[in-house]
Amino acid sequence: MSPVLFELLLRSIWETVLMTGASGLISLVFGLPLGLALVATDRGGIAESLWVNRSLGAIINGFRSVPFIILLVALIPVTRLIVGTSIGTWAAIVPLSIAATPYYARMAEVSLREVDHGLIEAARAMGGNRWTIIREVLVPEALPGIVAGFSVTLVTLVGASAMAGAIGAGGLGDLAIRYGYQRFETSVMVAVVVVLIVLVCGIQWIGDRLVARLDHRG
Amino acid sequence: MIGAWLAEIGGPLLSGPPWRLRGTETDIEMNQHVTAERADPIHIQPTGREDVVRLVGLKRRFGATPALDGVSLTVQKGEIVGIIGRSGAGKSTLIRCLNGLERADSGEVFIEGREIGRLGERELQPLRRRIGMVFQHFNLLSAKTVEENVALPLKIEGRPRAERMARAAELLQLVGLSEKAKAYPASLSGGQKQRVGIARALAARPALLLSDEATSALDPETTRSILALLKDINSRLGLTILLITHEMEVIRSIADRVAVIDAGRIVEEGAVWQVFANPKSEITRSLLGSIRPQLPPEIASRLAPGVGAETILRIDVAGEAARGALLSDLAAAVPGQFRLVQGGVDHVQGQPVGTLFLAVAGAEAAHLAQVTTFLKDRGARVEVLGHVAGPV
């Protein structure tokens, strides 16, 4: 591989890491409260409100049912509004975040729903309010699942960011298509695949280690 | 709904000092509570009676089935009151009405003279901090260490960390688990988990402890040690305890008074030894069946009316009547042969409670009348169960 291609590879890795990391963080910041809201407003939840629950559920399902490549194009006006441009790495972070947030919200919802109702009752019996229940019971008890869901979301984002090449976002997927496939640079293709494997395994490994450390359920 | 939720999140910042119940503690803490009482205009003065809990005509339905059908009950300060019933009798609903986890459809719940049935969720929160609760499945937080679990009620109260940890250490000492302070609940045995549950329930110095089948998930030996701990806490701290259970053994071990609940109604209530000595309802007799002497089935199946070689009597005797030399006096006063077939004397709350199955030779009506009259004069209850053809 020529030094020029190698430099391109390094830049692409950085672009992929940036897109995955930034949209991952954004999905965590918005997805976790959304997941909490889904659990809290559901029947028997700590802030039961079925119409809020159904509305949130419908919006999340709506976003999740649109294929990412279509979302990428459909969100161009929104992206332009937020970032100022619809082309490039930063522009790709907007549709990636918007796709990953409802995905992660569902992941967090599943973990939060598994928290034993008896623990919530115990916190209520101690005189805790809803905020206490969220802070002391729901989130800490679901934390292993919340972290595991986050690593799965990051891995999914690595894959999704490859599609962002379609709007000139760069990244490893873009590199593999333009150089590895269209210009028959097999070495680039192989290098991209190896880097992706290392990246995904790394994310999963860190995630698993973190979960093992956080999980005290025995 | 969301609005109320947001208001609640802002609660600790917006609300004034929480009103307090009369505490049971006698230490320095007491002074703080007294000050809080005086400073707080909405505190209702106790009525002078020492009722910690008073329930009046409590009713609650789930769909068409009544879970509580007019329950009235009083628990006095320092008492251990046991509520026993089969599963589905309404015990769990009843105990949850006492701290507002469950709302009654009608009737009144007084906790230390204050009616709580119409309080909103936010008004109930400070009240719940004064009522400890122990659960069947412990309900310890897996993500927190033992000491963090014990200190949680104080964290909810907003106490500083140093105070919380000091109190947790004190309570873990009380329940004998000091060395497990830094462990996570998953590494504890069932009995240890329940000790942590009890320590946690005591953290905020409650006026009342509710026990929801606290020993039902434990083996007999662990059950005994947990019950001994509860009894010890009751006598050392003067803590009022209300417990629900389906096991008479639990009632026998620690309760002062028992209320038997069936189909949402209290069918029988009284001092434990008196209910044991003279159960009035069928359900009580059935619940007592497992721990009171019963006629062995092979003899019961041979009982027949009319005549036989021997007559089987059931004699129930308790209190003063059970202290005398009943059987030797009987043999001296009435001729004939008497054999003890089954039975024994148990001691409940320090009172002897005996059930004896006596085989009397022959089946002569006059002779039997003499035997029963003698026993009844001595304060025993006598029932002629029937006759058996041959010796048993």
Image (cartoon, coloured by chain):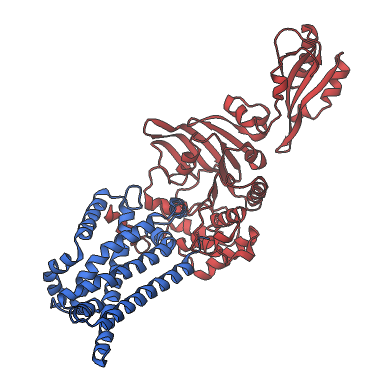
Chain colours: A blue, B red
- Compared across the picture, whether A57 is left or right of A216 comes to left
User: Can you say whether B192 is above or below B385 in the image?
Assistant: below
Looking at the picture, how far across and down is residue B378, in whole percent?
A: 78, 21
| Relative depth, front residue between B169 and B313 | B313
User: Can you say whether B251 is above or below B39 in the image?
Assistant: above
Say whether residue B281 is visible: no
| Relative depth, front residue between B296 and A100 | A100
| Relative depth, front residue between A181 and B134 | A181
| Relative depth, front residue between B308 and B149 | B308
Looking at the picture, how far across and down is residue B328, in whole percent?
A: 86, 23
User: Can you say whether B381 is above or below A183 in the image?
Assistant: above
Say whether residue A56 is visible: yes
**For residue B10, what is the image quadrant?**
bottom left
Q: Residue at x 67, y 34 (%)?
A: B291
Looking at the picture, how far across and down is residue A166, in whole percent?
A: 16, 74
Please identify the residue farthest to the bottom as the structure is shown.
A3
Q: How many marks?
A: 0
Q: Residue at x 63, y 64 (%)?
A: B178
Please identify the residue farthest to the right as the structure is shown.
B332
User: Can you say whether B137 is above or below A75 in the image?
Assistant: above
Q: Residue at x 14, y 78 (%)?
A: A87
Looking at the picture, how far across and down is residue A27, in whole percent?
A: 28, 68
